Image: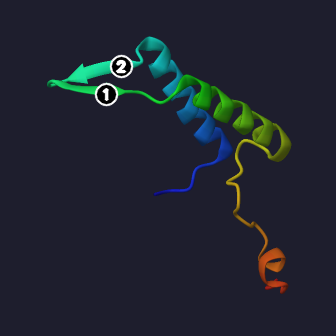
Amino acid sequence: MALLTIGQQLEEVQGAISAVMASQKYSIAGREQTRADLSSLTSREKELIARGEKYGFDVIMGQQTSTKAVYGVSFG
C-alpha cells in the first residue's frame, strides 16, 4: 500500500462522500453492499482539511524529510 499525501487522502474521502450521497446501498449480482458512514467520512474530511492547512496538502504525515531529524547526523 502506497503512502498518500494529505491532499490525496482528502480526494479519496471526498470521492467516498460523493458516492454515499449518490446511494448509500447498492446491489451487484445479488449481493448487497453498504458504503461507509457519512458522518465518519465528513469527520475525516474536516481532520484532513485542518492538517492540510497546517502542514500542507502535499505532505505525507509521519514521514521525515530530513535525515538529521531522524538520525541526528548530516550527510551533506
Residue at (49% x, 14% y) in the render: 21
Q: Amino acid at mark 1?
A: Gln
Foreground of the two, 6 or 17: 17
Instruction: Work out how far the residue at label 1 is from the one at label 2, CA to CA, in angstroms.
Output: 6 Å
- Badge 2: residue crowd in 10 Å (few <14, some 14–19, many ≥20): few
Which residue is rendered at x = 77% and y = 42% of the image? 51
Q: Return the x and y of residue 24 as percentages of the image width and height.
A: 42, 18
In the depicted view, which residue is nearer to us: 76 or 66? 66
Which residue is disc 2 drawn over? 25
Residue shown at 59% from the left, 30% from the top: 41
Numbered mark located on residue 7 in the image: none
Q: Dot 1: what SS?
A: strand
Q: Position of residue 4 (x, y in %)?
A: 58, 50
Q: On the picture, is 3 further left or further right than 31?
A: right
On screen, residue 3 above or below 40: below
> Vertical placement of 57 versus 29: above or below?
below
Q: Is residue 73 above or below residue 8?
A: below
Asked if marks 1 and 2 touch (Cβ < 8 Å), the reply is yes
Q: Earlier in the sequence, mark 1 or mark 2?
A: 2
Please identify the quarter of the rendering in which residue 54 is found. Answer: top right
Residue at 53% in and 35% down: 12
Q: Which residue is mark 1?
A: 33
Q: Amino acid at mark 2?
A: Lys
Secondary structure beneath disc 2? Answer: strand
